[in-house]
Image (cartoon, rainbow, N blue to C red):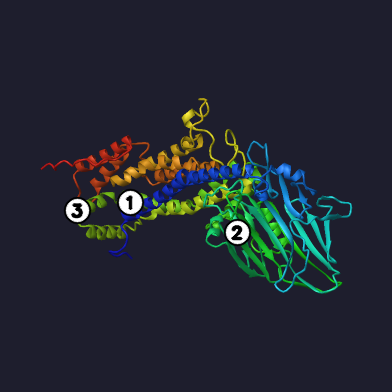
Amino acid sequence: MHDRDSMHPQDMRNLIIFAVLSISMWLGYDYFIARPHAEAMRQASLKAKAVAEATAPAQILDTAIVKPREEIIAVTSRVKIETKSTSGSINLQGARIDDLMLKDYYKKADKQEHVTVLSPAKTPHPRYVETGWINGKDTAVPNLPDSDTKWTVKGANTTLAPATPVTLTYTAGGVTFEKTFTINDEFGLSVEDRIVNNSGKEITLYPYALATEHGLPEDFLNQGVIHEGPIGYIGEKLEERKYKDFKKKPEESFTAQKGWIGLTGKYWLTAMAPAAQNEDTKFRFISSPAINEKTKDRYQADIIGAARNIPNGADASYKINVFSGAKKLSLLQKYQGEWGIPHFDLAVDFGWFYFLTKPFFLVINFLYHLTGNFGIAIIIFTCCLRILVFPLANTSYKSFAKLRQISPEMYTIRHQYKDDKQKLQEELVKLYQKYEVNPAAGCVPILVQIPIFFALYKVLSNTIEMRHAPFYGWIHDLSAQDPTTIFNLFGLIPWTPPAALMIGAWPLFMLTAMIIQKNISPPPEDPIQARLAAIMPWFMTYVMAKFASGLVIYWTVNNILAIIQQVIIMRSMGVPIHLFSADADKKKLEKEIAEGPSVHPSLEMIEEEIEEAIDGEIKGVSKPKPKKKKKK
């Protein structure tokens, strides 16, 4: 069952501690060093570009002129868009969908400014959707519509709404081009491009659709743990590209019959999918660099359909479905079915633990609809989760209790073979086999908590449903960090501390729970482990204070439930609770030694070690002391 090459239990504990510390240090580095540095560089770059573009003379580079979004929209002829969830317009020059605002979503929790997902060219953050036709290699149809083409509204309707489609038309060289736009109330619309050929000859054209943006998005986070940039599910595979990837590979294309492609941020998505998911289609990610320092890099996701051979007197059409709005999972799943596209729900970045993250979200969202508050839903979810892992925790605590029962024999073996590690490990393994004890069982709950923690982190920080979701009291956004801090006495002192000192009330509740949980059991025998155990709650609190407050609430409630569960199990098994009685461990050990094997260290030595452990707990650090000589 065991051999001399098996891992020592102490090494296993050290490995677990190392893993937890490594993850914590990585998260700390990301939050306090990498992300602030990236944000500072981004802001500096945006400020420099904004100054250059705003002052650039028109005669030098007209495309470098940047004007306010409202001004650009006001001076162009447009078809109005009006639905229950969106408001915007279609530019009649180029027939671009380049103006879309979300009525139910705001940039900040104060609800002062709406989120815009599409903006025209020459605005600070352009993003738009365009469809049309392009010539093939062997064909050259003159006067194809482009971004400068002036389109005309067909009919009297000039407002695109769910009940009123809009058709635009343009004729050149005997060829008539039509675009029919339809829209619904839930961020979904379609564009059908139709050609009527009266040119006197056969023509061949390829349909296309593109979503493009100039420069990085306004709300670009650059967190690394959440995908931002071009995305698509093409054929049988999810394809994601970061903005920085284009520096090495500016263009990449795929051919498949099924799929969708677009541009995504943390909460917003602009994506396109061919209405006919049964013909060979070219999907492409492409980027073009800025012409000079006054312009921006351009990032694009586009689709090119199969060729249409159109004889004289005939017509042809191509339909594209477009989604531009909030990445609400229920909507993505709805369009996945209606449009017949694969895995549209993967536009929400559920991460590596997708098999946990999505079920967690569905359960929490269900509980939210029952309770009306996501914070309460998180607390109920935490209770349910503790019930599910109860058997595992129960096994862990029982194993811990057995270890406490054989601690006198372990003590004897450790001191008897302290200079022979190989022999020490062999004897300990024999002891564990004799009493059927698994010393690594206590580590299993920690290992289980790691994927659960990261899955819940994804749910709380990445799903639109949690954005700006309030709790009770001072928590107005469960997806943001606790806005209070102890360093200004939670707002009583009129001073705003720096971001590094934002340690709110909920993180302090979490700290208290972690300290109580740590002190229920006596400190580790190893001085290094004792120091790490003493520091860990403070370090974890400092790191997690920057996390979403919903995640801090989960961890706090989880620790409180773990404390209650551990106390109940320890009392039922007669194991002393170190927190309630500092002398309990000493008395228990004395009794076990008196009834145990005849070969034991002197009580004086054991008393010394217990006093050291208790003293270390009081001071926060266990310090080894020189041992006294045995009395003859």
Q: Nearer the viewer, residue 300 or 544?
A: 300
Q: Are marks 3 and 2 in contact (CB under 8 Å)?
A: no
Image vertical order of residue 327 relative to residue 544, above or below: below
Q: Nearer the viewer, mark 1 or mark 2?
A: 2
Considering every residue shown, the one lying at the far left of the view is 632
- Sequence-wise, which precedes: disc 3 or disc 2? 2
* Residue located beneath label 1 in the image: 403
Label drawn at residue 287: 2
Residue occupying image coordinates x 51% and y 30%? 496
Determine whether, in the image, residue 300 is placed left or right of residue 576: right
Q: Position of residue 423 (x, y in %)?
A: 22, 60
Sequence order check: which comes first, mark 1 or mark 3? Answer: 1
Residue 578 at x, y percent in the picture? 35, 40
Rounded to the nearest angstrom, the CA distance separating label 1 from label 2 is 61 Å
Query: Residue 246 is drawn in which quadrant?
Result: bottom right
> Which residue is nearer to you in this view: 139 or 507?
139
Q: Is residue 81 visible?
A: no
CA neighbours of label 2 inside 10 A, class few (<14), some (14 to 19), many (20+) = many
The secondary structure type at the circle numbered 2 is: strand
Crowdedness near tag 1: few (<14), some (14–19) or many (≥20) residues, C-alpha within 10 Å: some
141, above or below 32, in the image: below
Along the viewing direction, whichever of 213 and 449 lies nearer the viewer? 213
Q: Identity of the amino acid at label 3?
A: Gln
User: Label 1 sits on what residue type?
Assistant: Leu
Q: Position of residue 421 (x, y in %)?
A: 23, 57
The reply to whether dot 1 and dot 3 touch (C-beta < 8 Å) is no
